Image (cartoon, helix red, strand yellow):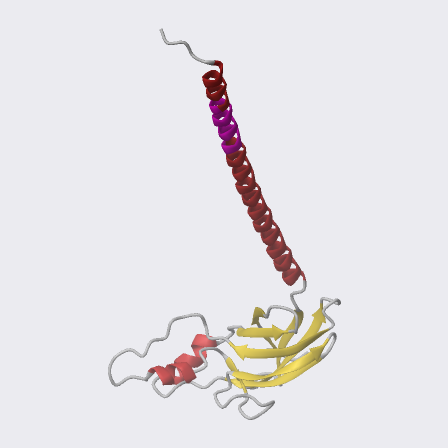
């Protein structure tokens, strides 16, 4: 058997030590990388959680700040085809004011298609107020079809009074049938509100038409 010199033994030991050191360094590097990766993942999860919490809080705040209105509609006289809509901004107190409040007549909720050839066009359908009342065109800045009135700023406690009239049956529909269809039906409204620093609010109301006291 060949004898191993002390120099060769020392060299082998040094090589082994170097390999062990390299292995340890590699393990430390991998461990550090894994720790950094886990730390980044934890940070990403924390950021995602914080964003979710912030979004929930924004939605909660937006809901709590939803404007409240009292809306009434009263005929100008018993049997009159004219009526008055009164909208009062009642809260919440923290909101104080609205930059714009837009009021629009909603249709009755049914789908009204253009139907057979020779019938009303889609534009005719869209221009028709499918409900019992409309805003009086030209009064309070109402649109020509009586669908909506211009947006206006409102302070807390302020009110708007708007003129209504009974809607007109379109030319392709029997007038008596139209009146009977909407007799006693509520006036359906969109109320859209805007305030700087807040997401818009879109509110709906179904308002019965009352006789004057």
Q: Give whichever of 128, 30 is nearer the camera.
A: 30
Q: Is residue 179 magenta?
A: no
| Residue interval drawn in magenta | 15-26
Q: Give whichever of 95, 26 is nearer the camera.
A: 26
Q: In the rendering, at what x and y percent does residue 14 appear?
A: 50, 23
Q: Quadrant of residue 140?
A: bottom right
Give me the residue at 50% from left, 18% from top: 10
Residue at the farthest top position: 1
Residue at the farthest left position: 117
Give me the residue at 60% from left, 56% from top: 55
The quadrant of the rendering that contains the C terminus is bottom right
Q: In the rendering, at what x and y percent does residue 15 appear?
A: 47, 24
Q: In the rendering, at what x and y percent does residue 65 appear?
A: 67, 64
The quadrant of the rendering that contains the N terminus is top left
Give me the residue at 53% from left, 34% from top: 31
Q: In the rendering, at what x and y percent does residue 182 appear?
A: 47, 76
Q: Quadrant of residue 35?
A: top right
Q: Give whichever of 203, 43 is nearer the camera.
A: 43
Figure disc tally: 0
Horizontal relation, residue 97 to residue 45: left or right? right
Q: Is residue 23 magenta?
A: yes
Above-or-below relation of 182 to 123: above
Above-or-below relation of 193 to 20: below
């Amino acid at each position: 058997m060949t004898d191993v010199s002390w120099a060769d033994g020392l060299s082998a030991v040094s090589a082994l030590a170097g390999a062990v050191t390299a292995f340890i360094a590699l393990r430390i590097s991998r461990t550090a990388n894994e720790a950094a990766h886990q730390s980044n993942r934890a940070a990403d999860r924390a950021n995602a959680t914080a964003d979710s919490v912030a979004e929930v809080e924004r939605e909660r705040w937006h809901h709590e700040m939803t404007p409240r209105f009292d809306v009434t509609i009263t005929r100008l006289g018993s049997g009159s085809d004219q009526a008055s809509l009164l909208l009062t901004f009642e809260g919440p107190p923290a909101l104080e004011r609205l930059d714009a409040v837009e009021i629009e007549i909603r249709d009755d909720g049914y789908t009204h298609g253009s139907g057979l050839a020779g019938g009303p066009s889609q534009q005719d359908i869209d221009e028709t107020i499918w409900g019992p009342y409309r805003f009086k065109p030209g009064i309070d800045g109402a649109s020509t079809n009586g669908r909506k009135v211009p947006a206006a700023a409102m302070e807390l406690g302020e009110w708007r009074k708007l003129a209504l009239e009974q809607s007109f049956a379109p030319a392709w529909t029997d007038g008596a049938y139209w009146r009977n269809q909407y007799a006693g039906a509520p006036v359906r409204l969109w109320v859209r509100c805007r305030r700087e620093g807040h997401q818009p609010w879109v509110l709906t109301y179904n308002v019965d038409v009352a006789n004057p006291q």
